[in-house]
Image (cartoon, rainbow, N blue to C red):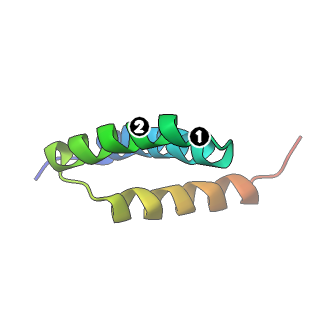
Amino acid sequence: MTNSTPSLIAWTAQYREYRKLVEQGLHDEAALLKSEIDEGLPWVELTWDDLEHAYANLETTLADEPTS
């Protein structure tokens, strides 16, 4: 069994970028990035659901952090 944490972090960053593009209305760019993500996920044994779950956890963690 390998440690997939580095892969999950890297791919979650890509997913986060995808979400930003969608929110900005840059649908063509988002579709291209989604296609790249979809192509790469099987290589690192992750799924789109894994990314959505990790992203949700990241957003919750960031929202819970106190601001300076």
Count the labels in the image: 2
Expressed as whole percent of the image width and height from the top left, the position of residue 17 reads: 54, 38
Amino acid type at mark 1? Leu
Mark 1 lies on residue: 21
Q: CA distance from mark 2 to mark 1?
A: 9 Å
In the picture provided, is 8 more to the left or to the right than 4? right
Q: Secondary structure at mark 1?
A: helix
Residue at position x 63%, y 56% in the image: 59
From what the image shows, is residue 33 above or below residue 45? Answer: above
Pick whichever, 18 or 30, lies toward us: 30
Q: Position of residue 66 (x, y in %)?
A: 82, 52
Q: In x, y percent, where is residue 5?
A: 33, 46
Q: Residue at x 46, y 46 (%)?
A: 15
Disc 2: which residue: 33
Is residue 40 visible in the rendered image? The answer is yes
Q: Are marks 2 and 1 in contact (CB under 8 Å)?
A: yes
Secondary structure under tag 2 reads helix
User: Mark 2 or mark 1, which has the lower sequence index?
Assistant: 1
- For the question of whether residue 9 can be seen, the reply is no
* Local crowd size for mark 1, using a 10 Å CA cut-off: few (<14), some (14–19), many (≥20): some
Between 32 and 10, the residue placed more toward the observer is 32
Q: Is residue 61 above or below residue 34?
A: below
